[in-house]
Structures are given as C-alpha cells and as structure tokens.
Amino acid sequence: MSDEFAGSGDPAYEAKVLMISVAARMAGMHPQTLRQYDRLGLVQAGRAAGGGRRYSVRDVVLLREVQRLSQDDGVNLAGIKRIIGLEQLLEQAQQRVARLEAELEAAYRRVAELESLTPFPGRDLVRSTRPSTALVVWRPRRNPER
C-alpha cells in the first residue's frame, strides 16, 4: 500500500478528524460503504464524543486501496481484510527491525568506544569494582589450520 500523501510521517496523517461525509468524498465512495467497511473491520473509524465516525488521512488512503483491490483486482472483502492485516504485520515487523538495527549499531559504537579506551587493544576488558583494577579475560586463539 502506498501512502500518496507527503505528510505520512506527520501525526496529522493519523489523526481521526474527518467526518464520514468528507472521508467518503475524498475516497470516492458512498458514506454507507464506509459504514459497511467499519462493521467488517476493514477500515476502522474513530468515534467523536457524540458517537459519529471520524477518519484520518491514512484511513482515506486505505479506503482507496480497498476500492482498488476490489474493483481492479477482483479481490473479495475477506481477502482484502487478510491483505490489510498482513500488510500491517509487515509494517510492524519492519519498524521493529529498524529499531533493533539502530540499537545494534549503537551497541557496536559503544563497544568500539570502550575498546579504544583500553590499554590492551584487541582484548576483552572487564572493569572491576575496585579502583585502578581491571580484569583481562583471556581466550585461547583457535588455529584455523587444524
């Protein structure tokens, strides 16, 4: 699913502020279609204090994708719901991978920083709780020829 709005990283993109009539017009659909999709769990609206449905720009993009999958590709609503669910799982996994990669990179930088401080380059250094004391952990080198 492509986000056609440049502000997709903007919190306003996710804000559920569009009334159903506005969202339906933006998506090129009838408001009753949006109500049906909400009941089916395809595109879930937020609720205003008075109970009226509210949609975000992201929801409008999703509504257009639902319409495209249905009309152009002939996918039924159950299939569309499955596709949307899988795309959401993929997006969550990609975000998690990005976070973990950033954490790993930060850990590598920290290790390099600590290794640059040691008087024993290339050795593992474990700091002791005693002042002016360090413990060097020795590992025998493996001979790759054996």
Image (cartoon, rainbow, N blue to C red):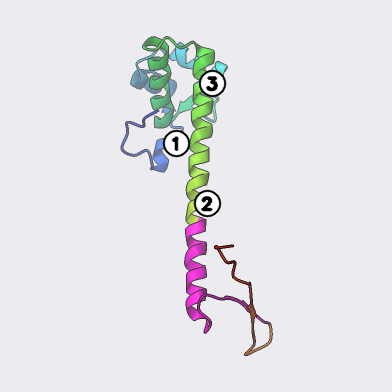
Labels 1, 2: front one: 2
What amino acid is labelled 3 in the image?
Arg
Residue corresponding to mark 3: 82
Residue 117 locus on image (x, y percent): 50, 80
What amino acid is labelled 2 in the image?
Leu
Give me the residue at 44% from left, 21% from top: 20
Magenta stretch contains residue 125:
yes
Q: Horizontally, is 11 left or right of 144 in the view?
A: left
Secondary element under disc 3, as helix, strand or loop, is: helix
Q: Earlier in the sequence, mark 1 or mark 3?
A: 1
Q: In the rendered view, tell whether residue 92 sits above or below residue 38.
A: below
Give the spatial CA distance, label 3 vs label 2: 27 Å
Labels 3, 2: front one: 2
Q: Horizontally, is 72 left or right of 102 in the view?
A: left
Give me the residue at 48% from left, 41% from top: 94
> From the image, which quarter does the C terminus lie in?
bottom right
Secondary element under disc 2, as helix, strand or loop, is: helix
Residue 44 locus on image (x, y percent): 52, 25
Marks 1 and 3 close (CB-CB < 8 Å)? no
Residue 54 locus on image (x, y percent): 47, 27
Residue corresponding to mark 1: 15
Q: Earlier in the sequence, mark 3 or mark 2?
A: 3
The residue range painted magenta reads 103-128
> From the image, which quarter does the N terminus lie in?
top left
Q: In the rendered view, tell whether residue 52 sits above or below residue 6.
A: above
Q: Looking at the image, can residue 45 be seen?
A: no
Residue corresponding to mark 2: 100
Give the spatial CA distance, label 1 vs label 3: 24 Å
**Closer to the camera in the image, 88 or 27:** 88
